[in-house]
Image (cartoon, rainbow, N blue to C red):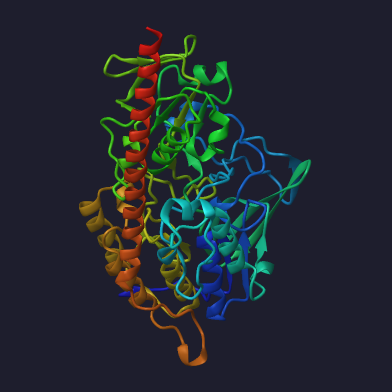
Amino acid sequence: MSRTQQPKKPIKRVAVIGAGPAGAIAIDALAQERTFDLIRVFERREGPGGCWIGDKDRPAPLSNFSSLASRTADPPVPIPATLPALTPKLDQPRFTESSVYPYLETNVDAIPMQFSQEPFPSEKSEFSKALHGPNTPFRHWKSVRGYIEGLINRNGYQDFVSYNTTVERVEKVGDEWKVTLRKEGERSDYWWTEWFDAVVVASGHYWVPWIPEIKGLEEFERARPGSVLHSKHFRGRDLYKGKKVVTVGASVSAADIAYDLAHSRTALSPVHAITIGHNFNGYFGGEAFNHPRIVNHPSISHICPKTRTVFLVDGNSIPNVDHIIFGTGYSWTMPFLPQVPVRNNRVPDLYQHVVWQKDPSLLFVGAVGAGLTFKVFEWQAVYAARLLAGRAAVPDLKEMKEWEEERIKVKGDGPKFSLIFPDFEEYFETLRRLAGEGETARGVGRKLPKFRPEWFRAFMEGHDLRKRMWKRVNEQDREEEKKVAKVLEGDVRAKL
């Protein structure tokens, strides 16, 4: 086998799945190669933005908890025998709902979020300035959505995109990719196929919630629909006024929600957080859970739906619970690509998290864990575009497999495999070397700058800023609690 390989035939027609941040930058990287006859982008939501799109309606209550626990909740859907076809609207849950709520802010500095050639919006919300000062590095979710929308609605790129269009199947037939599509209408779905030389998967992996299996949980939800939700379905604190809430999870979303409900005094005090024995997020730590109106507990053993009691593994219990909110992460699913099965919540057989080793005409942008993600998307997109344009190549299959095997030895064969932290510079510079410069003399190809350590510094300093904010507010609220306790104690003594 040769030392390097490229797609066997010239690539002229490219499909991109997803119009979120990864898809947006993939469009520009492909377009700037100026070699493709057709770039088609398919987005199942109504507009650009991916998981940064807000929803007007509350999500439907959760169901089928066994499939959520086993990570089988998003299976492939049946394809009509003859295409094109018009069918009744699909009623299978697809988990396309948003994960944002009205006052959500980014938890990452704007500097590492912006692409190298497109500055991030500078406007800062009053909410963020009140928490972090006038130079807050964080942005409201609408700024992020607008940023992504602006990337797509330029240079005529918007004409590439078909919205409300779900990719239901991607399969290789001969030397072409057959893409089966479904467009949602008001009363029915329209199905058809299109053919491409290559496919870029940029659909993200924060869609299908993972909720652990707990005896009594589904019955608890059925007794009062809406009692159990995942953090992606959280639509703000006001829905939980005076409610007894249990949060589950020790990472970012559970921390944000538990802290929000406790600090705002919205939920019934205290908020009960299932964190003991679980690992806090490596970036943010556990300071948010130190709020005086949060009580931390070990794992749930089972739930009694009749009494709405949450029993814990240490023998204690929490009675009369109104809501259980899970901040327990997501299941990576690709029902449209049955030939690329997800393993241990990661996509196997990828070289540099981009190239499908079995066929370099199938590429991924965004198949990584958290950390400098938008910039990672850009470097991946440029490498993918260069490969498809024939201006870059990948090693032979043996070397690609060895790269994956060596990484499994170091990171494991699970989610940590896809985590770039802390080796950002090494990864960015590897992709930049593999992608090459393009044909800069002719202005062809998006140019990648050298990695700048200040991106990583801003990324980490943003986390430190949030941790300091939690610590400061926790101390203030702790002092406030003491004052309230003294007043109450005085009232009791006066009555005696």
Q: Residue at x 72, y 39 (%)?
A: 89
Task: Left or right? Give the position of 240 relative to 402.
Answer: right
21 vs 243: above or below:
below
Q: Quadrant of residue 418?
A: bottom left
Q: Position of residue 364 (x, y in %)?
A: 45, 60
Closer to the camera, 35 or 114?
114
Indicate the quadrant containing the N terminus: top left, top right, bottom left or bottom right: bottom left
Residue at image x 43%, y 31%? 69
- What residue lies at 49% left-to-right and 34% top-to-bottom? 230
The quadrant in which the C terminus is found is top left
Where's residue 214, x and y in %?
Answer: 40, 22
Q: Is residue 92 visible?
A: yes
Name the residue nearer the viewer: 233 or 415.
233
- Foreground residue among 386 and 112: 112
- Say above or below: 412 vs 449: above
Number of callouts: 0
Would you say residue 200 is visible in this rendering?
A: no
